[in-house]
Image (cartoon, rainbow, N blue to C red):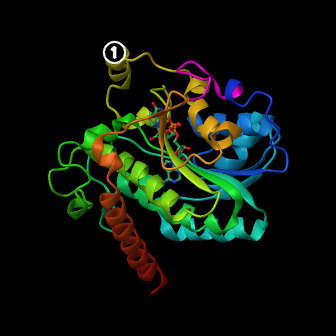
Amino acid sequence: MTPFNFHSTAQEVTEGLDLSGQTFVVTGSNSGLGKESIRVLAMRGANIIACARTIEKAQSAMDELGISGTPIACDLADLHSVSQAIKAIHAINTPIQCIIANAGIMALPTLQQVQGIELQFFTNHVGHFHFVTGLTDLLTDNGRVVVLSSRAHAYARPQGLELDNLSGERDYHDWRMYGRSKLANILFAKSLNQRFQGTNRRANSVHPGVIKTNLGRYVPDREAMYAQIQKTIPLKTISEGTATQCLVATHPALEGIGGEYFSDCQIATPLPQGLDMDLAEQLWTVTEAIIAKVLALKST
Ligand SMILES: NC(=O)c1ccc[n+]([C@@H]2O[C@H](COP(=O)([O-])OP(=O)(O)OC[C@H]3O[C@@H](n4cnc5c(N)ncnc54)[C@H](OP(=O)(O)O)[C@@H]3O)[C@@H](O)[C@H]2O)c1
């Protein structure tokens, strides 16, 4: 348990921490929760490696915030771009304290694919899998990985991940596919954490809350959606929404805690499929195969 809750902000959960000399890599750093993360981590002294689809987006976010750091182009929907980002980060040649796999897209109204894989699943899970596994060798001895998931992993029900339908072609549904990608985020963090066994490295996933950001851009009437959600769950501010990922990325009290799913700054319980280690291992194998196939295509 931590002393923080639903209303804690990213600034509050990092209060008093000195992150100087520690490097944090954040994807989706130009918007919403990613941008607030780099602001608060930099305020605590961290070195920032800010990733965005383009180097210009990463740099202008840091300029707007008045912080310095290294901008990296990383388009998660393009594994070649992800490989280039991995290479560029290796070239910086600095140990990484934490990778926050934060970028994401949600509820694409029509089926879009990359190399035959549905775009939300590809961006949110496959791109991050390649990115994170390409950088784990740079993690410090007690380095952490934080993967942004969502309570919306519940939308993957009733079928769940459907590893035989990652193309999304069978019965495409905008929210269900988003849910699958977010379930994959939980399972990826669990499998990765298992691979960290015997080390002090840890991986966890996070539900940040519901926050009005650019994430809702593809939802036709996003204001109506937020109004509907607000009837049952209060919305968070961006700073409240960024608290859980910043806490899990930095807090000394969480040293040694891994393979967990956090919400409102506490350990929470995902749906049963988010606890299924057999499924997590199947997903790992399938994802490695997708990446190998796509990278082989790119290099021919
Ligand atoms: N906001 C919420 O209520 C909520 C709830 C649950 C979970 N989450 C999760 O929180 C994370 C952050 O979301 P947010 O609310 O901060 O959304 P956001 O403001 O839309 O930010 C998403 C970020 O992801 C980037 N991105 C999208 N596609 C990308 C790609 N192909 N390659 C690289 N970057 C890409 C976006 O870049 P561009 O600006 O270039 O598009 C943007 O920087 C997501 O993983 C989301 O699923 C959010």
The answer to which image quadrant residue 156 occupies is top left
Residue 113's x, y, as percent?
Answer: 32, 60
Residue 263 or residue 278, whichever sits in front:
278
Residue 127's x, y, as percent?
Answer: 47, 60
Image-based side of 212 in relation to 109, left or right: right
Amino acid at circle 1? Thr
Position of residue 174 relative to residue 289, above or below, is above
- Name the residue rendered at 69%, 55% in the picture: 142
Residue lying at the far front of the rendered structure: 198
Image-based side of 92 in relation to 105, left or right: right
Residue 193 or residue 145, whichever sits in front:
193
- Name the residue rendered at 33%, 44% in the picture: 178
User: What secondary structure prevails in the magenta region?
Assistant: loop
Extent of the magenta region: 1-11
Image-based side of 207 in relation to 157, left or right: right
Residue 140's x, y, as percent?
Answer: 72, 60
Image-based side of 284 in relation to 24, left or right: left
Kindly tell me whether residue 109 is visible in this rendering. Answer: no
Reading the image, the residue beneath label 1 is 232
The answer to which image quadrant residue 155 occupies is top left
Position of residue 44 relative to residue 28, above or below, is above
Check if residue 94 falls in the magenta segment.
Answer: no
Which quadrant, please, contains the C terminus?
bottom left
